[in-house]
Image (spheres, helix red, strand yellow):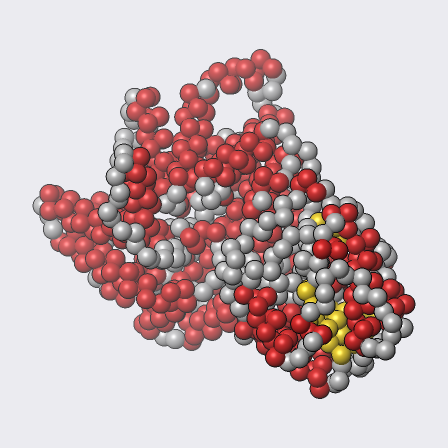
Amino acid sequence: MIVAFVAVDQIAGACLYYFFTHQVSGEYAVANHVVYKLNEDVLVLGSSRASHHYNSSLIKDSLKLSCFNGGRDGEGLLYSTAIFELALQRHIPKVVVLDVTSDVLSEKEDEKSRLSILLPYLKQSDVVGNMIEKKGKLELLKSHLQTYRYNGQVVSIFQHYFLSSGNAVMGFDPLTNKMDVSKVSTHTSLKPYSDSISADNVEALNLLINECKRQKIQLFVFVSPRYNDDTQQNSYLKMKSICNNNKVIFHDFTNDVYFKNPEYYSDRAHLNSRGADLYTDTVAAFMKKILNPEANVQYLSKNDIHGSLN
Amino acid sequence: MIFNSFTFLLFFPVVTVLYFLLPHKFRWMLLLAASCYFYMFFKAIYILILFFTIIIDYIAGIYLEKVTDPKKKKLLLILSLTANIGVLAVFKYFNFFNANLSGILYWMGYTNPIPFLQILLPIGLSFHTFQAMSYTIEVYRGHQKAEHHFGIYALYVMFYPQLVAGPIERPQNLLHQFKEYHQFNALDVSEGLKRMLIGFFKKVVVADRLSIYVKTVFANYPEHGSATLVLASLFFAVQIYCDFSGYSDIAIGSARVMGFKLMENFKRPYFAKSISEFWSRWHISLSTWFKDYVYIPLGGNRVSKSRLYFNLFAVFMISGLWHGANWTFIVWGALHGFYLVCGMATQKWRAAVANKLGIGKGGLANFLNIAFTIFLVTISWIFFRAVSLEQAWGLLKGIFVYKSGFFIGEPTYFLYDFMAIAALFFYELKQEYNLRSLRFLHNENWGVRMASYLGLIFIILLFGVFDGGQFIYFQF
């Protein structure tokens, strides 16, 4: 029985690995590109706000640098750092854009449990193992079961292996709907500065910054626009201070008046494709000024570029 | 420690192997030590509460046997029950009653001077307290001899498979089993492991999978349409059944592996054709506890109709309060009491109407009765699941006042939900109607059996939710 179990686990695990790595669409197809195929100059990392806000093609046209958007819905710094480390195993991009939310360093209930999505990449890097260990001491032991690594993914793997769905291009996944402004509150339900900082998230951010320094990668940390202001968080202050201390270019577009037009939004936290294109143009111009100070670039934002450029 | 944790998967085989390796006279020590370790995984200090009631009931049991004067016997029983109920009152109900008192005093223009207790509810408190009470009551009634071996008695209260969420055992069924020598029995091991596997399937593949949808919808119920709220309520009905009966399956299975036979706690309750039948299939160890120690002492069926209705209603109100110190649970219990009283009062009338319509008997009648019972039970679960009466009313309003929109969430997860329910329905149907031709885990063919074991294990590994957390009933 035990022998049969181990054999089936190994065979099923190998089959699932094949289908997993050959998905043609979906979020894992994006992650697989970063891990196994990345050869672009610019890598965008972050949550859904990264994947929906940074148009890779526009960045490529503007900076004359190829770009891939590796953002993923619902994921935070632990995921971004792990996927970045995995990418570095075989390719070093010239520029990394890390899109962060104001609460990126806050302690979140489900952030660690979501790390299971990294299990299929376990054998690729020790960093993944270290991240998964944060979920629980026995998590790595469980992951010796090959099938467990694909827990909850089977239908999705086959769906994205056989069917190409979604409209993501080079990882950029534009949202097409327009926000119904009558249903949206600009107020946040969060109490100002009530969040507690996650030591794991701080560690992950430092790891990512240090790795960029070590590999001489130009790192940009951006808070992309959102319709409501949610910056009154300890996490936001901490993140700004870490970036300042490490001389990382940080810019917050949250309250950029240029992006307060509801026509640009899909919901209060996400730009739609129109907003994303405008934002990408803005951010690309911003980056171009730093990457190529000689270029005559007009920065689109009506706000001044502050802090980081000084 | 929870059954659906990896720690338990290490703990269980180690304890079981040691159990069979040890000579019989040392086994109780191992089981008691293992049970203490199991319990202390939650909050170690709370084991002192358990020891407090164990010592009181142990001494009470011995004296209840010795004393012949009925008045003194009654006094001893009252002392023992007061100690047990006192622990429940302090740890589970104090803050609830204090909050209600505060509300009343506030309404009258006063301030409540009694402070609230800053304590956490010990896990499974109502379960082991009720099991301990059943011992002293049975000794008092003369149905059970007092246990003179302190370790064995402590083990009766603390036996780890059923310590935190039952089944709530009776001393006549469990105590003697600790004194019997259980030889390694391949059949017990095989049946026990199969039962555990079914329990894990119910918990991690069905209950915890459905809980993702339920949690999302209930947390934001004003935003959702009626169809979504109906579906989430139905999902919760399945979730709570699989969560609790899954726990019972693992408890019964893990005890069976070591040769212990615990009582059955569930018999496919959603096949019940009436609310009274539902209660003969749902949480059997608790409903029989209330029947034996509350309902029958109140007069049982041998009273006037109005008294009978009152008794039923009172028992279910208490049952609601047993579940939790919240008005939602009391309303849940009261609803079931109301259902039962209505069911009894209208029984003849309903039968006459059904006969006139030609649906009094047969498959259609059974189907309609099952569907109506599920409908009533699901309505009551809304109160059970809601965090406040306000939320429960809001949910009911959302269901009955039509609002458009349907929430799917993550499509693959939504698909898993239906796959899990379909698998569960197939399994329950097979059990209910004893469809022998559809045997898998008990198939006579060795190959089919092995393939079924492996299939079920891999279904759990691939589709289970392993971060689902605690069992719902642990909080009681």
Residue A108, horizontal then vertical, whole percent: 56, 62
Quadrant into which the N terminus of chain B falls: bottom left
Q: Is residue B77 visible?
A: no
At 33% across and 33% down in the image, what residue appears? B314
Q: Is residue B163 above or below residue A204?
A: above
Of residue A119 and residue B312, the one placed in the foreground of this image is A119
Residue B328, horizontal then vertical, whole percent: 43, 39
Q: Residue furthest bottom?
A: A214
At 36% across and 57% down in the image, what residue appears? B120
At 18% across and 46% down in the image, what residue appears? B78
Of residue B292 and residue A189, the one placed in the foreground of this image is A189
At 36% across and 36% down in the image, what residue appears? B317
Numbered label tally? 0
Of residue B315 and residue A92, the one placed in the foreground of this image is A92
B64 left or right, relative to A29: left
A282 left or right, relative to B181: right
Q: Is residue A128 above or below residue B173?
A: below
Q: Is residue B175 above or below residue A60?
A: above
Residue B26, horizontal then vertical, whole percent: 33, 73
